[in-house]
Amino acid sequence: PRIVRADPDRPDLSLLVEAAQLMRSGGLVAFPTETVYGLGANALDVDAVARLFAAKGRPADNPLIIHIADRAQLADLTLRVSPLARSLAERFWPGPLTIVLDAAEALPRLTIGGHSTVAVRIPDHPIAIALLSAAAVPIAAPSANRSGRPSPTTAEHVVADLDGHIDLIIDGGPCPVGLESTVVDARGASPVILRPGAVTAELLGVAGPPPAADASRSASPGTRYRHYAPRCQVAIVAPGTGPARADLEAAAGRSVGLVATAPATDPRVRMLAVFTDAASLASDLYEALRAGETAGVDVVVVEAVPEAGIGRAVMDRLRRAAEGE
Ligand code: TXA
Ligand code: MG
């Protein structure tokens, strides 16, 4: 596809207006958000949305998140904005929080995977916001990866997965958060987390979902599918034990990549990322998994982080990658 560079601090507005126009006329445009790159299409254009599902190889019953630039648009997409949704939007938008409500009748069923609810967010990224404002229509934007692959956190990842299937990529550099948004059901009195993310259970003031919960698997359609699966084995090990485990794997003749808080001693170990805390692991994780694959390692050893704050989201994605189901 065509790739254009955009500086998040000083985005070229004429370029973004052109990209928005492309989406208004049915095109597929990949763009950066604070979480991961999204693949945008006009959420009201059934043909564009059908192309989007095809480009990703996404199951038709897995609904898309609709991206907007302005809180006022939430009312057009939903049957009713609950008081809870209103307060969450007030507090966390723009930001990595996706709010699920009952869907407006007028929304194409294809966009919402044939369900009766809709997921909506305002991303916190200057390029995304400018693009969405210029589009002036709601934009359906799943992560810009082939279905079942790790989400893209750079434009290179988008090219690797979707070259030949999309019209344009806006390259705004790496995504700062690095993991997909928190998804919450806001139809009731308190938020129910369907997918953990950077807006944490602690920030939301609720108990986090139990790790890899069966409940969340059925509640959020996408979590049922094989996700975040790299093309090599992923071994999750206790904090601080990554280098020792990687050295062992190398000594056993396996080619090994390491994601840990300290480097391995065996020079055969390929260091994929050194992280300091859960947030820094979140921002480097998908790049590290893809780098491990590209290098053709047999196994990527990753040190676990505590199951608190954004650590819940990190461990959720890591377990899915390790399952490789
Ligand atoms: O950070 C993000 O959310 C990124 C960026 C691009 O905004 N987008 C993203 O979209 O991760 P996607 O399509 O890769 O993941 C959307 C998740 C899926 O697990 C989907 O099943 C769930 O949100 N979802 C969408 N609509 C839903 C709904 N009505 N009810 C429950 N879950 C829903
Ligand atoms: Mg995705």
Image (cartoon, grey):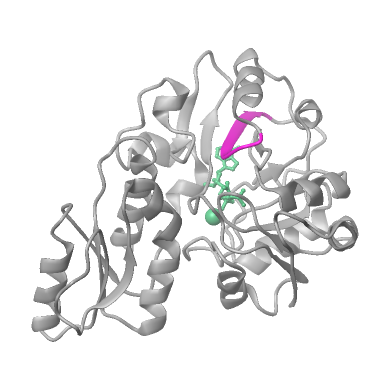
Viewer-proximal residue, 104 or 245? 245
Quarter occupied by residue 65: top right
Q: Which residues are magenta?
A: 94-102
Q: Is residue 118 above or below residue 229?
A: above
* Residue located at (40% from left, 60% from top): 285
* Residue located at (66% from left, 61% from top): 53
Quarter occupied by residue 247: bottom left
* Residue located at (65% from left, 26% from top): 89
Q: How many marks?
A: 0
Q: Main secondary structure of the magenta part?
A: strand
Q: Position of residue 259 (x, y in %)?
A: 29, 64
Q: Is residue 38 above or below residue 188?
A: below
Quadrant in the picture for the N terminus:
bottom right
Viewer-proximal residue, 175 or 276? 276
Give the residue furthest to the front.
10
Q: Is residue 95 magenta?
A: yes
Q: Position of residue 10 (x, y in %)?
A: 77, 56
